Image (cartoon, coloured by chain):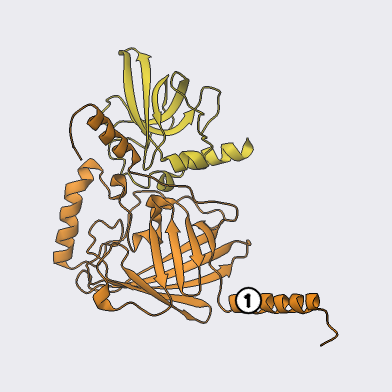
Chain colours: A yellow, B orange
């Protein structure tokens, strides 16, 4: 667990490795503690970036919101394993928000339904 | 010798082969293994977007590079974001922070970058004839040993204004000098000193240094990048939307 947390921490604070393929121009990566929770509609671990769609309910109502995330390989090295995030799970993203305030963000980290962080 | 049993003779022969093999293998440093970015103990993580020294680009080259950035930067587009490998010299100088694996043979060294499963081949035998080569993002690399150092010369590159740090023309020539060392902290470190000569693009020679750290027990992961696009394409076909590719 200690090793896992270390890896997750490294991923969160290693923007060069994590953002290897993205200029992140859409996202405000200076904000690194923004938490967004929702129900997983889609979780596609992929390279160069993972696609995550959550059903989110907040003051704006209930809607599906798409997030971009680290590459599958970077999530793997931070502790993600196949099947860890499933459709219907309630998860939390540590997500850098969009610069224009629109829905979405860049998932710097994930807290899975069982509390596992990667 | 006639008193020696056949079993012992075979054993002695095998031992001789092993010793000869070991001696042959020890002729040059062995770079085989998985390597990740080296960071000195206590050093802070490099920050993306940190200011970089301006490059000594010729005005025509700078105009090309600026035009490229004016095109892609507002959208955040990069070659890697579109599943295109980095190419030289970026592949060797970083490869997106992902590890690389070196497989060393006598006549060729394969450098497999996890990102995009990009591969560099460094030939050590007979160089290919120039007329048999064509430009490529990683060019054609030919190496030779100079004592404990591996010297690699790369040419036949494509013009690449999309290189993250060192854009270059098709006439760029890159020389790398690789050496292996063990740091005081015990880390096995591979150092590459790069010199790029490109009079078409630069007013002076470009130099850079990159250090990699040996990562025992780490395996390279598969890096399929086009799969989601392929799946989406198939889905469109299934829905009768025709060939959109």
In the image: residue B66, left or right of residue B35: left
Name the one closer to the observer, A45 or B44: A45
Q: In which quadrant of the rendered view does residue B85 lie?
A: bottom left
B96, above or below B156, in the image: above
Q: Chain of mark 1?
A: B
Q: Residue at x 39, y 55 (%)?
A: B95
Residue B162: image x %, image y %? Answer: 25, 56
Percent x, y of residue B206: 31, 70
Quick check: can you spot residue A12?
Answer: no
Q: Relative to B76, is B84 above or below?
A: below
Could you tell me residue B84's position as x and y percent?
30, 51
The answer to whether residue A86 of the structure is visible from this angle is: yes
Residue B215 located left or right of residue A73: right
Q: Position of residue A112 (x, y in %)?
A: 50, 26
Does dot 1 land on a helix, a strand or a loop?
helix
Residue under the point 55% across and 53% down: B42
Q: Is residue B57 left or right of residue B124?
A: left
Front in this rendered view, residue B62 or A30: B62
Quadrant where the C terminus of chain B is found in the figure: top left
Residue found farthest to the right: B3
- Quadrant of the drawing holding the N terminus of chain B: bottom right
Question: Hey, which quadrant is residue B9 in on the image?
Answer: bottom right
The residue to which callout 1 is attached is B21
Relative depth, front residue between B186 and B228: B228
């Amino acid at each position: 667990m200690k090793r896992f947390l270390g890896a997750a921490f490294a991923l969160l604070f290693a923007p060069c490795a994590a953002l290897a393929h993205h200029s992140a121009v859409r996202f405000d990566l200076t904000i690194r503690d923004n938490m967004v929770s929702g129900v997983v509609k889609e979780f596609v671990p992929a390279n160069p970036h993972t696609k995550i769609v959550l059903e989110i309910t907040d003051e704006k109502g209930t809607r599906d919101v798409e997030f971009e995330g680290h590459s599958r390989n970077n999530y793997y090295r931070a502790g993600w394993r196949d099947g860890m995030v499933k459709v219907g799970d309630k998860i939390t993203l540590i997500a850098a928000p969009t610069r224009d305030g629109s829905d979405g963000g860049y998932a710097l980290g994930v807290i899975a339904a069982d509390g596992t962080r990667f | 010798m006639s008193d020696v049993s056949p079993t012992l003779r075979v054993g002695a022969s095998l031992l001789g082969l092993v010793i000869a093999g070991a001696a042959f293998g020890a002729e040059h440093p062995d770079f085989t293994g998985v390597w990740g970015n080296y960071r000195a103990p206590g050093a802070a993580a490099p920050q993306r977007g940190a200011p970089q020294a301006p490059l000594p680009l010729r005005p025509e080259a700078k105009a090309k590079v600026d035009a490229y950035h004016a095109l892609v930067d507002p959208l955040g587009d990069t070659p890697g974001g579109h599943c295109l490998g980095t190419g030289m010299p970026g592949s060797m100088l970083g490869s997106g922070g992902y590890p690389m694996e070196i497989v060393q043979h006598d006549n060729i060294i394969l450098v497999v970058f996890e990102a995009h499963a990009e591969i560099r081949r460094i030939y050590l035998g007979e160089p290919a004839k120039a007329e048999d080569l064509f430009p490529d993002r990683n060019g054609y690399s030919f190496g030779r040993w100079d004592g404990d150092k591996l010297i690699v010369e790369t040419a036949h590159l494509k013009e690449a204004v999309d290189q993250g740090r060192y854009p270059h023309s098709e006439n760029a020539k890159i020389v790398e000098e690789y050496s292996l060392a063990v740091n005081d902290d015990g880390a096995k470190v591979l150092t590459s000193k790069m010199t790029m000569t490109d009079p078409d693009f630069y007013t002076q020679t470009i130099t850079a240094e990159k250090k990699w750290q040996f990562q025992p027990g780490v395996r390279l992961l598969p890096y399929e990048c086009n799969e989601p696009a392929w799946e989406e394409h198939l889905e469109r076909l299934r829905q009768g939307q025709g060939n959109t590719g």
